[in-house]
């Protein structure tokens, strides 16, 4: 059996990931993955199940009002969930069932922990706001995971229609490739279900390479002059654009995705940081992180709307209905 090195494990890290994962999880997950890869026969699916078990223990701790223990088990659960993707990519042992299991396991963990947190605090204080908090966390998480693949399907449907219609349409192939739905506001791909992409196919689905987009490329909404200045933009707007491009390049060098409030940071705020800080922080931190996450989702929907307007139907063939169910 091949012996893997720590450098081999590092190669399995995603090209770009959430800042929470890059700085607070990967340094531990890589070192945990190494002995698992070299000295055990644990499969990615077994690690996913272990992650779910740890998540269930976290929920039980929250329900018993052991907040710090719950936060610790939630962190361990998430860390093991990152390890399973590294083992799958390292050994090439991922399966389609493993991808489903990882996805469903994540949703179950969040719902259980949100319910445990709400129950524990409501039983202790009788404050109905904690029930609302648990429901809001679960609903927002489920919405995010339902919304992302549907947005991706909209994008793919329009791209397919334009490709079938041919390059004679306005914009031609260049507009198809300059696809704003494949990039976030700084040019990095956002169509990911966060660390769901630690998927067990061995492919990084969270980075820009998911759709072949340049993670530090130009803003796809802009058409530039040969000199590189965006056409039709005021000097202040061009300065803002250049700032965001520099910021994105800086983040890319550190493997950090440019949308800084994703589901991973939301989970970390609600289930790790707030419980460690104490019960007083649960509602304020959950509300603040939830508002930021919702604002990011609204922004992505707005960009999708702009994309559908720009790439509207151009021929009768393009007018055929796409069933997105």
Image: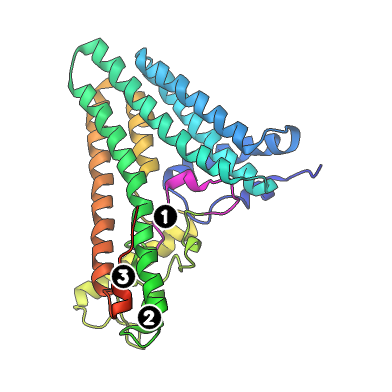
Against 272, is 2 above or below?
Answer: below
Question: What residue sits 60% from the left and 35% below the top?
Answer: 45
Q: Is residue 190 magenta?
A: yes
In space, the residues marked 3 and 2 are separated at their CA atoms by: 12 Å
Dot 3 or dot 1: first in sequence order is: 1
Residue 273: which quarter of the image?
Answer: top left
Name the residue nearer the viewer: 230 or 162.
162
Question: What residue sits 80% from the left and 45% below the top?
Answer: 2
Against 307, is 258 above or below?
Answer: above
- Any part of residue 261 in sight: no
Is label 3 in a helix, a strand or a loop?
Answer: loop
The picture places residue 201, in percent across and down from the top left corner, at: 59, 50
- Residue occupied by mark 2: 165
The picture places residue 218, in percent across and down from the top left corner, at: 37, 73
Is label 2 in a helix, a strand or a loop?
Answer: helix
Q: Nearer the viewer, mark 3 or mark 2?
A: 3
Residue 189: which quarter of the image?
Answer: bottom left
Which residue range is magenta in the image?
A: 186-204
In space, the residues marked 3 and 1 are separated at their CA atoms by: 36 Å
Against 272, is 67 above or below?
Answer: above
Q: Nearer the viewer, mark 3 or mark 1?
A: 3
- Residue occupied by mark 3: 320
Mark drawn on residue 267: none
- Residue occupied by mark 1: 257
Dot 3 or dot 2: first in sequence order is: 2
Is label 1 in a helix, a strand or a loop?
Answer: loop
């Amino acid at each position: 059996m091949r012996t893997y090195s720590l450098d081999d494990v590092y190669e399995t890290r995603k090209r770009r990931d959430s800042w929470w994962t890059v700085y607070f999880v990967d340094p531990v997950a890589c070192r945990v993955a190494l002995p698992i890869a070299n000295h055990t026969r644990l499969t990615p699916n077994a690690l996913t199940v272990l992650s779910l078990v740890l998540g269930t223990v976290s929920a039980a701790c929250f329900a018993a009002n052991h907040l710090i223990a719950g936060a610790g088990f939630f962190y361990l659960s998430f860390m093991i969930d990152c390890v399973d993707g590294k083992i799958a990519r390292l050994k090439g042992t991922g399966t389609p069932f493993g991808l489903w299991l990882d996805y469903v396991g994540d949703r179950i963990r969040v719902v259980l922990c949100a319910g445990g947190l709400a129950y524990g605090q409501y039983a202790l204080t009788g404050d109905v706001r904690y029930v609302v908090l648990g429901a809001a966390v679960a609903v927002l998480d489920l919405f995010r995971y339902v919304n992302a693949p549907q947005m991706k399907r909209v994008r793919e449907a329009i791209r397919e229609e334009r490709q079938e219609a041919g390059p004679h349409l306005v914009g031609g192939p260049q507009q198809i490739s300059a696809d704003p739905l494949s990039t976030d506001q700084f040019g990095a791909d956002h169509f990911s279900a966060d660390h769901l992409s630690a998927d067990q196919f061995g492919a990084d689905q969270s980075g820009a390479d998911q759709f072949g987009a340049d993670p530090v490329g130009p803003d796809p909404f802009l058409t530039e002059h040969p000199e590189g200045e965006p056409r039709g933009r005021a000097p202040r707007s061009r300065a803002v654009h250049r700032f965001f491009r520099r910021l994105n390049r800086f983040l890319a060098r550190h493997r950090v995705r440019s949308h800084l409030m994703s589901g991973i940071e939301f989970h970390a705020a609600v289930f790790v940081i707030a419980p460690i800080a104490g019960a007083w922080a649960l509602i304020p931190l959950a509300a603040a992180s939830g508002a930021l996450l919702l604002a990011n989702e609204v922004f992505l929907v707005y960009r999708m709307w702009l994309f559908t307007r720009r790439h509207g139907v151009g021929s009768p063939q393009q007018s055929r209905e796409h069933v997105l169910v």
